[in-house]
Amino acid sequence: MQPVRLRNLKQYATIPNAISLARAFMVVPIVVSLNRWDLNANRLPMAATIWIALAILSDFFDGWFARSYKEVTRIGKMLDPIADKVVIFGSFFFAVPINSTVPLWFILFIFFRDASVSLIGLWVTKDSKRELQANRTGKWSLAFTSSTIILFIFQIYPWANYVLAFTVLLNSVSWIFYMRLYYIYFVVDVKQEKAAS
């Protein structure tokens, strides 16, 4: 029995999953280095800038490795968006330069958008074999959310406000796409369950 468990464990020990896990832990140096910054827009926090860039790049590379080396796993599809949320919301709530410059309503908007997508998605797929994973609009939403944060903490106006407005629009469209997909999943699964019974 033990060898089977080890074999099952090894199939999840992939490079893409390791990259996603590493990205989640990047929130620590991002928050620490940002909180050590004196908020002087003329002196960029280089350590934080490097860590943020690595987090953004890792989000690209874990997907690239998974597709290129056919290492797409069920746990990887769940781990990738979880890592994204850990970095985003960890930075939102614990990095002073972010929560003191980014509008509170935007932070709450992103929080409730992501929470509703995750919770409704889990509820819809809990009794089926369907898997939760980020769609393309979700990935673009994450990229623009990250860009909004960067523009605000570096006080790059008026572009910060322009990108924020577009990010809200993109996240709203992405939310509609998710809800539409979940509705289809729900209707199809309910029909299949009734047909089977």
Image: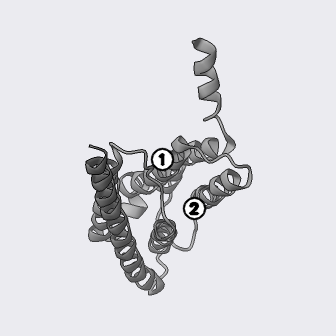
Looking at the picture, the colour scheme in use is: one colour
Count of all numbered marks drawn on residues in the image:
2
Residue lying at the far top in this picture: please name it: 1
Residue 174 position by quadrant: bottom left
| Nearer to me, 159 or 63 | 63
Q: Is residue 4 above or below residue 73?
A: above
- The location of residue 94, given as percent across then percent down, is 38, 51
Q: Report the residue at 44% width, 57% height from top.
A: 88
- Callout 1 crowding tier (Cα within 10 Å): few <14, some 14–19, many ≥20: some
Residue that numbered label 1 is attached to: 78
Q: Is residue 8 visible?
A: yes
Image quadrant where one finds the C terminus: top left
Q: Position of residue 120 (x, y in %)?
A: 29, 54
The residue that mark 2 highlights is: 45
Pick whichever of labels 2 and 1 is earlier in the sequence.
2
Mark 2 or 1: in front is 1
- Which residue shows up at 60% across the image and 27% down it? 8
Q: Amino acid at mark 1?
A: Met
56 left or right of 173 in image: right
Q: Is residue 112 above or below residue 7?
A: below
Q: Is residue 64 above or below residue 4?
A: below
Name the mark on residue 123: none
Position in image of residue 129 (x %, y %): 43, 45
Query: Toward which corner of the image does residue 188 lie, by quadrant?
Result: bottom left
Q: In the drawing, does residue 34 fall left or right of residue 124?
A: right
- Provide residue 185's location: percent of width, then percent of height: 35, 58
For the point 25% across and 49% down, the residue is: 194
Q: CA distance from mark 2 to mark 1?
A: 32 Å
Mark 2: amino acid = Pro
Residue 110 shows in this picture: no
Which residue is rendered at x = 33% and y = 43% of the image? 126
User: Badge 2: how crowded within 10 Å, few (<14), some, or many (20+)?
Assistant: some
